Image (spheres, rainbow, N blue to C red):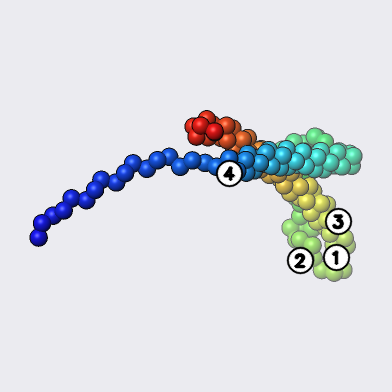
Amino acid sequence: MTATALPAPAAAAPAAVSTVRLAVVRWIGLVGILAGIVMIAAGGTVWGMVSSQLADQKITVAEDAPFLAGNTVDGPLSAYAQATIINTHALEMSDGKTYAQLDRDDPMRATVMNASFLRASLFTSVVSFGVAAFAMGTGLIVGLLGFALTRLVPATRRRAGA
């Protein structure tokens, strides 16, 4: 048996990118930029609304809070600080028992229940701030990716000779 030489593979020519595909990529990039702007605006709007609604309540973080004592509750950290100290006060009043652990006829049950509702409301605000920040961050990333796609199209056209 004799060995036969295989022909060398031909150099692959660069694949030409069609004008239609480049246009689609550019449109996807523009949609990404627009979506990013909308997400940043929506997140900022929600952040502002939650902040102003909290500020309108004129709540001040209790002086014995572990942090931000005396600050107005109008942001995620101050809402968290106030929720934390509400829990501390409720547990002190109820000898360490939660609402569910108190007897039905315990006179502290209504007070501890109100404290629990206040904490839940403040934690809802904290979550709302988090979702708003997430939307703004995601919007920034989507917008930057869209911008990168729109910059990619002219560079691809130059290389392809289009």
Q: Quadrant of the C terminus?
A: top right
**Which amino acid lies under the numbered mark 2 shown in the image of this protein?**
Gln
Q: CA distance from mark 4 to mark 1?
A: 72 Å
Mark 4, residues whose alpha carbon is within 10 Å: few (<14), some, or many (≥20)?
few
| Residue located 29% across and 46% down the image | 9
Judging by the rendered image, the residue that carries numbered circle 3 is 114
State if disc 3 and disc 2 touch (CB < 8 Å).
Answer: no
* Percent coordinates x, y for residue 14 in the rendering: 43, 40
- Could you tell whether 146 is left or right of 51 in the image? left
Judging by the rendered image, the residue that carries numbered circle 4 is 21
SS category of the residue bearing label 1: loop
SS category of the residue bearing label 3: helix
Tell me the mark number nearer the camera, choosing from 1 and 3.
3
* Percent coordinates x, y for residue 139 in the rendering: 68, 41
Q: CA distance from mark 2 to mark 4?
A: 65 Å
Query: Which one is earlier in the sequence, the residue at label 2 or at label 3?
Result: 2
The answer to whether one can see residue 141 in this image is no
Position of residue 99 relative to residue 26, above or below, is below
Q: CA distance from mark 2 to mark 3?
A: 15 Å
